[in-house]
Image (cartoon, coloured by chain):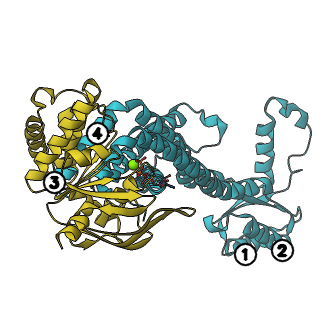
Chain colours: A yellow, B cyan
Amino acid sequence: MIQLFRVSKVYPPNYPALTDIHLHVEKGEFVFLSGPSGAGKTTLLKLLFREEEATGGQIIVNGRNITRLDGAGIARLRQEIGLVFQEFKLLPSMTALENVALAAEVVGMSRRESRRRAFHLLRELGLREKHDARPLTLSGGEQQRVAIARALVNDPILVLADEPTGNLDADMAEETMRVFLKIHEKGTTIMIATHDAGVLKRFHHRGVQLQRGRLMSDSKSAQREVAS
Amino acid sequence: MKVAQLSFVFRRVLKSLRELLWTHILTSGTMAMTLFIFGGFLLIQENLHGLLRGWGSQIQIFAYLEHSLSQADLQSLLGDVRNYPEVESVRFVSKGEAWENFREALGAQSGVLEGLPSDILPSSLEISLKRPYRYRASVAAVAQRLRGMKGISEVEYPEEWIEKLTLLVVGVQWAKWILGGFLFIATLLIVGSTVKLAILARKDEIEIMQLVGAPAGLIKAPFVIEGMIQGVLGASLSLFFLWLLFLFARYRLPSSLGIFPAHDQLQFLGSEAISLLVFLGWLLGAGGSLFSLRRFLKTWGSGRQ
Ligand SMILES: Nc1ncnc2c1ncn2[C@@H]1O[C@H](COP(=O)(O)OP(=O)(O)OP(=O)(O)O)[C@@H](O)[C@H]1O
Ligand SMILES: [Mg+2]
């Protein structure tokens, strides 16, 4: 699903945010990307949805080399990826339902179908009563679930989340993580960046650790080493 | 683009027109002002034909004849002058007629002429030139040739008039493009900055659309369409005010000013000029939007390419 070969990213003028990253993520995997602040987690995710361009190496997402893409290519790539952010990025002037439906509409789904799907997703995520609420009248956890619904509305094969629980209290964070687990159970590949080392212990999924732009440890290759 | 996306763009435009009504009206008004001035020049230019017809008939060469000219010499002179290729018509004004004209011109003061012989004024030829020759160089050339003819003592023509006419024609043509071009660029910048405001107001929305993979065309289309609507609206507005100006000139401006020929000779812009104005409005709107969008989506936003 995701393959990175010797990927590096140097921010101008010459700040090396990522250096020589090798990473393979299989279809259907659930990966936690961890590391201290400034380690390069956000940068790595940005490379995957082409908010940033790698300065070295090759990146394959879903069989497509994304190191060289034009605007239309980037748009197509993003239609296959669901994105969730720490600060939710919901539009305050629209209702929860409209926020979710917008994402489907702009990639060509009819208004009616978009709203229908948004409605079902919100209900699945426990926001049955809230689809007409504006984001700012919702709790943080509810807002993040609206954002997750939006990430799912186009049936992504990959969901990338950058500190999705960063703005939530412990209970809300736990609940949000469970939502991701449920999505994962349906076969979606998920990659979550977090600096909360605790989740790695509580959830027994693959953990990839970055430090100062380098890949420090990968629980999957560690397991493989133990097995062999 | 799919039908669903078209309907999305359409709804977006309607929503924006509703929510930012005054911004749109102000932008249209700005465009209307520019187009009004440009259209005003077009109006003058289109009517310059009529104007020239009116003024052109005043361009005559007066050739004063020698007192001693015999009837036979006069006839041959008239024949010669009529054969000039530039000459449209020649009218002979006899001494008596000149005297009558002079008396009429003096009006109440004509008493001062009492006792003077009525053949004191010279007879003359009033020569009108064909239209293509009613400009300075050719009038001067004809005058020069007349001066060399036997029987003609003096030649006069309204040099000032001709000079003014030539200047006016050239002036309107240049002013239209220089002033018009200048205003066009200024308006483009104004439209550009209003679009920038509209873009900034919807910055978050644009960001999210980019993040979920909306095609660039879909993101830009509403702004460009809004610009076109504003432009065409602005052009219509300017045409409306040009029409008012036209009616005013036609019915309210006293003909005694002598600037315009007979009132009913004034004409409104032809269909070509109207199309040009609407097209320019459309171009202003679409161009201003695309200009801002390009800069905005390049410096800010996703997928730095
Ligand atoms: N646009 C940019 N220009 C220059 N430097 C940048 C830019 N974005 C990030 N950086 C730098 O790159 C490094 C990695 O940043 P990144 O945001 O990827 O870290 P992170 O692991 O997500 O940190 P956090 O846990 O605090 O979110 C940081 O030192 C940051 O200052
Ligand atoms: Mg980060």
For residue B149, which numbered disc appears in the image? 2
Q: Residues within 10 Å of mark 3 (few under 14, many from 20)?
A: few
User: Percent from the top left, x then y, of residue B84?
Assistant: 69, 75
Q: Residues within 10 Å of mark 1 (few under 14, many from 20)?
A: few
User: Percent from the top left, x then y, of residue A160?
Assistant: 26, 53
The residue wearing badge 3 is: B3
Q: Secondary structure at mark 2?
A: loop
Check disc 2 and give the amino acid type. Answer: Met
Q: CA distance from mark 4 to mark 1?
A: 105 Å
Q: Are marks 3 and 2 in contact (CB under 8 Å)?
A: no
Q: Amino acid at mark 1?
A: Asp
**Which residue does the image show at 24% across and 26% down from the upper left?**
A138
Q: Are marks 2 and 4 in contact (CB under 8 Å)?
A: no
Tags 2 and 1 touching, CB below 8 Å: yes
Mark 2 or mark 1: whose residue is earlier in sequence: 1
Please give the residue where the numbered disc 4 appears in the rendered image.
A165
The C terminus of chain B - image quarter: bottom left
Q: Are marks 4 and 1 on the same chain?
A: no
Q: Looking at the picture, which amino acid does disc 4 mark?
A: Thr
Which of the pair A125/A213 is nearer the observer?
A213
Is the residue under label 1 in contact with that under label 4 (CB below 8 Å)? no
Q: Work out whether A118 lies above or below B152.
A: above
Q: Chain of mark 2?
A: B
Sequence-wise, the earlier of marks 1 and 3 is 3
Q: Marks 2 and 1, how far apart in space?
A: 10 Å
